[in-house]
Amino acid sequence: MSIMKKIYILSAICIIIVIGFITIVTFFKQKEKKENTVNQNSNNIIENSIPDTFQKSKIDEIKQDLGYNNTDEAIYEIKKEYDGREVIVIKPNIQYKVAMAGAIKNGKPEFSEIDGLLEQAPNKSGIWIEKNSRKEFVEILQKYTNCSYTIDEDGYLVQEQKDTSNEIDNNIKKAISNKKNYSICINSVAYLIDEVTGNIEEYPFEEIDPEQSFELFETENASLYVITSNTYKRVNYKNIIEEVLNNMII
């Protein structure tokens, strides 16, 4: 074999090795970028405030005692039970964001899409009805109220007041006039972050308890009521509406 031929073969081998090395490096960089993007998306729904050293240590201690395997302390806060025992729960504002994203999507949201979904969330005071629940909710009100109701183009409940309004009508008027945002979704499930794993999960509250009226998620000046679909016909919608409104105007 000539020297030139050997040089060509060695050059070809070197080129193959370099290309292979570049391909491997590129693959792992893309993988790392993707993982960082997912982590960044999950962090976007978390408050900017990070637990101080003492609180972080306390949360870690409680997590270990409970056997929680989620490593993100920033999503937790410490609560005291009636007996003085300290427990950790997902911060209410984070649960609200996840639940609202799930209501808007009408399915389990991924961390990566929560910010986009929340762009469709209501941002004004009043009673906002989730898109897929509007027709049914107005029909429910027609059964138990004397006033007429419509949904405006932004999804908010509009009341046409009458002299013959009943107690439910009056409480709806009070809720609408409050400087808070109330959102209503009719569904048999809600979506939340599991306290043990830190993953977003579907919570089939109606299947677990057919007599449960609703799941409530709250943040500052905003509340989301996920009202049961009443698949099993175990609850009365009049009672549910009264309970929800009483909760709103307390």
Image: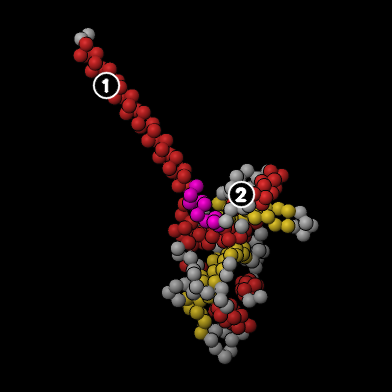
Which residue was labeled with disc 1? 12
The answer to which image quadrant residue 247 occupies is bottom right
Q: Is residue 40 magenta?
A: yes
Query: How many numbered circles are shown?
Result: 2
Query: In this view, which residue lies farthest toward the front?
Result: 53
Q: Which residue is mark 2?
A: 73
Whether residue 106 is visible, yes or no, is no
Seen at 26% across and 21% down, the residue is: 12
**Where is 167 relative to 54, above or below?**
below
Closest to the observer: 159 or 49?
A: 49
Q: Quadrant of the C terminus?
A: bottom right
Residue 33 visible, this orientation:
yes
Left of 12 or right of it: where is 211? right
Residue 162 belongs to magenta span: no
Q: Residue at x 55, y 78 (%)?
A: 176
Farthest top residue in view: 1
Three-letter residue code for mark 2: Glu
What's the residue type where badge 1 is placed?
Ala
Q: Nearer the viewer, residue 210 or 19?
A: 19
Q: Which residues are magenta?
A: 39-48
Question: Residue 246 placed where, x, y %?
Answer: 65, 75
User: Is 223 situated above or below 199?
Assistant: below
**Left or right of 173, for residue 131:** left
Within 10 Å of the Cα at label 2, are there few (<14), some (14-19), or many (20+) other Cα atoms?
some
| CA distance for labels 1 and 2 | 52 Å
Q: Give the residue at x 53% y 75%.
A: 126
